[in-house]
Amino acid sequence: MRIVQISHPQGLRAAVVESPNQLRVVEFDGGTYALAQAAIAEGLSLEAVIDRHLGQERLDYTQVIETGQLLAPMSHPDPAHCLVSGTGLTHLGSASTRANMHAQIAAKDSELTDSMRMFKLGLDGGKPETGRVGAQPEWFYKGDGDIVVAPEAALPVPAFAEDAGEEPELVGLYLIAPDGTPWRVGFAVGNEFSDHVTERGNYLWLAHSKLRACSFGPELLLGELPADLQGESRIVREGEVIWRKPFLTGEANMAHSLANLEHHHFKYAQFRRPGDLHVHYFGTATLSFADGVRTQDGDRFEIELPALGRALGNPLRFADDNDTTALTVAAL
């Protein structure tokens, strides 16, 4: 089952994707978050709760997009209680990239960069046996729920940004139960969106490069995730595709298992606070920046994983403010 979330005259609603252009509204206040809470409380699957409250109202999917009703497929009523984070150096990449990585890994450990050492840790220990803990991945923080941009809405680029590049990724959505147990709600396609020029300047600036907006959806896949996911990332400029590239994700194309990545995120007690929503990006191996593309105001990102439904699309909006005056902090 795949669902979306929409702004409805009766309030926030989830809707089931019945066909490429038809949605069926779920008659339950509070959208996906409230439905997931109910599923946890009743000990049922989310699909079972949705089936129980599935209404008869059907909507045209395209019209929902055109009228601006389409939202991220899950959100928290208080954005401060939504944590957006991610893990890097998790994917094997293309065959040529993989071969190059292995050639570097064959070198003496003292000759490896910190990034290559991290990648090697994942190759060697990122997929432990069931019930065992594997190597911990690179981890980063992006922001809270206020940085999430709805599908088809513009991704804002701050004036201080050096770059505005897409990162096509798989995203996991998690809700923390009253007893502190993390529950996986589902998966979506995402654009993690980063500043690669800043990151390239110094790898210790990675944290700065990640503090940008992001988007995921429009659909949330409930249930089992295919191990091999194949999609395409595109950039459209003035109606023409100026760059496109296939990308792979899913466990078959990753150095880490999803269970291992989830363990190393939720092992921290502060990430198991009841009621919190977690949006976690699992990493990528395909970037237009690596091919020399520099994005412009008005460019449109399109990221598609057919197994997860409709493509995620977002235009870019560059800030007009070019003021370089230092920010002054007021003192009490």
Image (tube, rainbow, N blue to C red):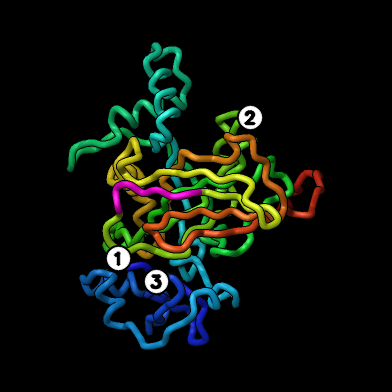
Q: Nearer the viewer, residue 148 or 41?
A: 148
Is the Cβ of the residue at disc 1 closer than 8 Å to that at disc 2? no
In the rendered structure, the answer to whether residue 309 lies left or right of residue 199 reads left
Please indicate, yes or no, whether residue 174 appears anywhere in the rendered image. yes
User: What residue is at 70 percent from the left and 56 percent from the top?
Assistant: 238
Residue 271 in the image, given as x and y percentages of width and height: 38, 52
Q: Is residue 228 covered in magenta?
A: yes
- Kind of residue at disc 2: Gly
Answer above or below: position of 108 versus 79: above
Please indicate, yes or no, whether residue 156 appears anywhere in the rendered image. no
User: What residue is at 44 percent from the left and 78 percent from the top?
Assistant: 13
Q: Nearer the viewer, residue 228 or 149?
A: 228
Pointer 1 local density, CA inside 10 Å: few below 14, some 14–19, many at least 20: some
In the rendered structure, the answer to whether residue 244 lies left or right of residue 98 reads right
Image-quadrant location for residue 133:
top left
Q: Callout 2: helix, strand or loop? A: helix
Task: State which region is magenta.
Answer: 226-232
Q: Nearer the viewer, residue 229 or 166?
A: 229
Q: Nearer the viewer, residue 244 or 204?
A: 244
In the rendered structure, the answer to whether residue 81 lies left or right of residue 317 reads left
Of the numbered discs in the image, which one, if any, rests on residue 32? 3
Residue 65 in the image, given as x and y percentages of width and height: 55, 72
Of the numbered discs in the image, which one, if any, rests on residue 239? none
Per the image, the residue denoted by label 2 is 201
Of the numbered discs in the image, which one, if any, rests on residue 178? 1
Marks 3/2: CA–CA distance: 40 Å
Q: Quadrant of the C terminus?
A: bottom right
Compare marks 1 and 2 and give the one earlier in the sequence.
1
Marks 1/2: CA–CA distance: 43 Å
